[in-house]
Amino acid sequence: MKYVIPLLVFAAISAFLFVGLDKDPTIVPSPLIDKPAPEFSLPVLGSEGGSFSTADMKGKVWLLNIWATWCVGCRVEHPVLVDLARRNLVEIVGLNYKDQDQLAIQWLTELGDPYIATAVDHEGRTGIDWGFYGAPETFVIDKSGIVRYKHIGPVAPADLQNTILPLVAELQGSSS
């Protein structure tokens, strides 16, 4: 009898762990989905006195990509974003997270700049408002400023083809 309770506790913990093994670690539910995108107005990288605001994108479907030069996954996804930008299918806004401006400018100069603007989040507060877990993260925002999708980790060509671009096309076709 003295072994029954520990055995039941062990069985319960094992069941939870077993169920967890079936989950995709890149899928983290976001409380922002189907809610208004957190508003921000931040300085634009490399621009003296320029600023970018979420209000600038009203009426457009767009992507917000949170990135940093110290982020290995950001380097992996960067060519995918550069290619996407060349295709002119959707505007991409960068949110440079807790980075040094000069390093970020150098990165974009050397690797290509897929962003229509790069907002600078030196303190990291805006990233936190967006529910940021770790770079890179990419959000799809509709014409009304509602967050429709969040991708955690590097965006791969398959992610674009299978999920992000079909959603963008659907949102661009609707009057949201």
Image: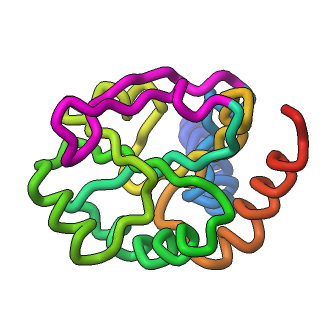
The answer to which image quadrant residue 47 occupies is: top left
The vertical placement of 34 against 78, above or below, is above
Residue 7 shows up from this direction:
no
User: Is 176 situated above or below 6?
Assistant: above
Task: Pinpoint residue 8: horizontal percent, then vertical percent.
Answer: 64, 41
Query: Is 69 a magenta residue?
Result: no
Tell me if I can see residue 171 in this picture. yes
Q: Which residues are magenta?
A: 35-58
- Color style of the picture: rainbow
Question: In the figure, residue 176 lies in which quadrant?
Answer: top right
- Give the percent coordinates (x, y) of residue 169: 82, 57
Residue positioned 69% across, 44% down in the render: 61
112 is higher (above) or lower (below) than 11 = below
**Residue 150 spot, x, y in % from top left:** 61, 46
**Residue 47 located within the stretch drawn in magenta:** yes
Establish if 14 lies above or below 44. Answer: below
Residue 152 versus residue 90: which sits nearer the camera? 90
> Quadrant location of residue 149?
top right
Residue for point 88% across, 35% down: 175
Determine the residue located farthest toward the right in the rendered image.
174
- Residue found 44% across the figure and 64% down from its top: 114
In this picture, residue 131 sits left or right of residue 151? left
Count of numbered marks? 0
In the rendered view, does 62 fall on the left or right side of 97? right
Left or right: 91 as drawn, with respect to 163? left
Quarter of the rendering occupied by the N terminus: top right
The x and y percentages for residue 111 are: 29, 76
Q: Nearer the viewer, residue 26 or 118?
A: 118
Q: Position of 20 compared to 97: left or right?
A: right
Q: Residue at coordinates 39% horizontally, 32% vertically from top-left?
A: 52
